[in-house]
Image (cartoon, coloured by chain):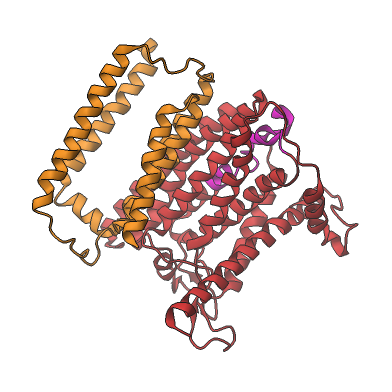
Chain colours: A red, B orange
């Protein structure tokens, strides 16, 4: 087998594994969310389909597949069909640069160690921000093409919200980038090796706590999660941008939302929680564990906090988070220069 | 291979560029503009300028065009039902004159370049990386870089003044 073929097959297998994992995560995150929220609200959640309702996502998937795919007569057909795809594709693409482990030989099955990431590019962080910022088009176009004022309002809110919170999100990461001196995600993970003060690992969450809080808050807003789920606010917008969607197109918006949650958690893990690092060396187990904890927090937020009002959302984003992110950046820059840290 | 990719991306950019102009609906125009931007971003990858690619996607495709769409949707522009009128001579005259000038410029540029076509040099190591670009921006191109930021600041202040007119 030639070198090229080998590289190609390795790559295809890795892409397949990541793709399948993300699909699985999207399905079972719904189950997890229903169970966790049910627990918090002292209910049972899904229990009927399989043990602990574990087969519920599969039943839901089959149901969604076989539902009638309704396209209302008043919609802008081309964009109406395009929007769900535009929403779900960036969600998958963004995961391509996240390092989810060290290297693996699959317990000695492979002749040489294979690194556990799909691509390791020089502009990793910018790649993720760039691709995820494209995800908003799906929502905006769905809102517009539905030709329905509630949907349009949802789409408009979404674009305003994403633009507002993207700024603070990018700024909150710059502190980390200053200390690492590279945009490459593997470099960022590598610079978190070792201990800050035993047994405290040298994760950026301990050096950049403010940055982490801002990043996570913005991640909630960027993924349209409560308390920032205004684009789909059920009680006032009748589900907003996806009111007119049914069947698998509807499901695709949900897949996009849950995969975006997973990607946001994975990015927070990589940037602030040491990625796949942990005792006994880097491993996907640590990575998945940390991501799951963050996903739990996502769900926890939804169960605990009421939705913001729209003006509160904008005030919070522009007048609180953005100045805080700037302050964090300036303090980090001054400290890094004074202590001679950073790249 | 490289030529084929270039030709493909260039064709996509050019065709969607034309489509931006001839669409009846502003939302579709904006979408084709995004495709044009995406194709240009692809050309940057072909030039091994990965940082410029990321910035192109992040700033133009991801932020500026979202605002474009936002404004178009906010104004709720209707579909233009007035077709192109061939009887409007002034438009044809101005457009035609501009097209002739542009084509002339292109021909002249190609003619003058043809004589001194040097073979493409391989990119130096580290070309197009974030570090190289950052270093260049803060050393060799510091002055243009700072001037650009001042221009942007002026634009921001201008937007503030226009928006807050009643306070002045």
In front: A112, or A37? A112
Residue span colored magenta: A217-245
**Residue at the image position 52 percent from the left and 23 percent from the top:** B74
Q: State the image quarter where residue A51 is shown.
A: bottom right
Res. A275 in view? yes
Is A228 within the magenta? yes
**In magenta segment, residue A11:** no
**Foreground residue among B32 and B72:** B32
Quadrant in the rendering for residue B163: top left
Tell me if A292 is positioned left or right of A219 in this view. Answer: right
Image position of A308 (left or right of B19): right
Residue shown at 53% from the left, 59% from the top? A95
Q: Is residue B56 visible?
A: no
Give the total number of marks visible in the rendering.
0
Q: Residue furthest front?
A: B87
Q: Toward the viewer: A130 or A295?
A: A130
Residue at 33% of width from left, 47% of height from top? A330
Q: Is residue A122 above or below residue A198?
A: above
Please state which of residues A258 and A307 is positioned toward the viewer in this rendering. Answer: A258
Describe residue A322's horizontal placement relative to residue A282 as left or right: left
Q: Is residue A57 above or below residue B126?
A: above
* Image location (x, y in percent) of residue B35: 44, 42
Q: Position of residue A192 (x, y in %)?
A: 44, 68
Task: In the rendered view, tell whether residue A210 sits above or below residue A7.
Answer: above
Q: Residue at x 58, y 71 (%)?
A: A286
| Quarter of the figure with the C terminus of chain A | bottom left
Give coordinates of residue A224: x percent, y percent: 61, 41
Rendered location of residue A163, percent (x, y): 48, 37
């Amino acid at each position: 087998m030639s070198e090229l073929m080998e590289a190609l097959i390795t790559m295809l297998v890795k892409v397949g594994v990541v793709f399948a994992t993300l699909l699985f995560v999207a399905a079972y995150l719904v189950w997890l969310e229903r169970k966790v929220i049910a627990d918090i609200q002292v209910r049972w959640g899904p229990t009927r389909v399989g043990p602990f309702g574990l087969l519920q996502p599969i039943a839901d998937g089959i149901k969604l597949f076989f539902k009638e795919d309704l396209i209302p007569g008043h919609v802008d057909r081309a964009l109406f069909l395009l929007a769900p795809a535009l929403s779900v594709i960036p969600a998958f693409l963004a995961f391509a640069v996240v390092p989810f482990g060290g290297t693996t030989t699959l317990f000695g099955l492979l002749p040489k160690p294979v690194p556990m990431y799909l691509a390791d590019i020089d502009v990793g962080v910018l790649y993720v921000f760039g691709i995820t910022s494209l995800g908003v088009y799906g929502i905006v176009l769905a809102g517009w093409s539905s030709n329905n004022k509630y949907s349009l309002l949802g789409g408009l809110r979404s674009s305003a919200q994403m633009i507002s919170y993207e700024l603070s999100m990018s700024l909150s990461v710059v502190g980390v980038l200053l200390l690492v001196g590279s945009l490459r995600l593997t470099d960022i993970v590598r610079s978190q090796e070792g201990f800050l003060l035993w047994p405290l690992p040298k994760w950026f969450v301990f050096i950049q706590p403010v940055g982490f809080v801002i990043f996570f808050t913005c991640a909630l807003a960027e993924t349209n999660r409560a308390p920032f789920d205004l684009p789909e606010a059920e009680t006032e917008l009748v589900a907003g941008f996806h009111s007119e969607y049914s069947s698998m197109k509807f499901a695709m918006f949900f897949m996009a939302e849950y995969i975006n949650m997973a990607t946001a958690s994975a990015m927070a893990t990589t940037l602030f929680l040491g990625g796949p690092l942990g005792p006994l060396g880097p491993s996907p187990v640590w990575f998945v564990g940390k991501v799951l904890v963050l996903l739990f927090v996502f769900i926890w937020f939804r169960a605990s906090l009421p939705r913001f009002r729209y003006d509160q959302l904008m005030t919070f984003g522009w007048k609180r988070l953005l100045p805080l992110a700037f302050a964090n950046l300036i303090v980090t820059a001054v400290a890094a220069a004074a202590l001679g840290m950073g790249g | 291979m490289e030529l084929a990719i270039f030709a493909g991306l260039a064709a996509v950019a050019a065709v969607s560029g034309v489509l931006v102009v001839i669409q009846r609906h502003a939302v579709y125009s904006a979408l084709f503009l995004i495709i044009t931007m995406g194709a240009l971003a692809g050309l940057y990858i072909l030039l091994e300028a990965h940082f410029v690619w990321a910035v192109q996607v992040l700033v133009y495709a991801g932020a500026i065009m979202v605002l474009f769409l936002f404004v178009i949707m906010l104004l709720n522009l209707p579909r233009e039902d007035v077709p192109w009128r061939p009887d409007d001579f002034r438009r044809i005259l101005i457009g035609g004159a501009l097209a002739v000038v542009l084509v002339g410029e292109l021909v002249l540029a190609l003619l003058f370049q043809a004589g001194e076509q040097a073979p493409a040099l391989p990119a130096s190591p580290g070309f197009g990386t974030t570090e190289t670009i950052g270093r260049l921006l803060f050393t060799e191109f510091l002055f243009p870089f700072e001037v650009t930021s001042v221009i942007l600041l002026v634009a921001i202040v201008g937007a503030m003044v226009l928006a807050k007119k009643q306070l002045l």
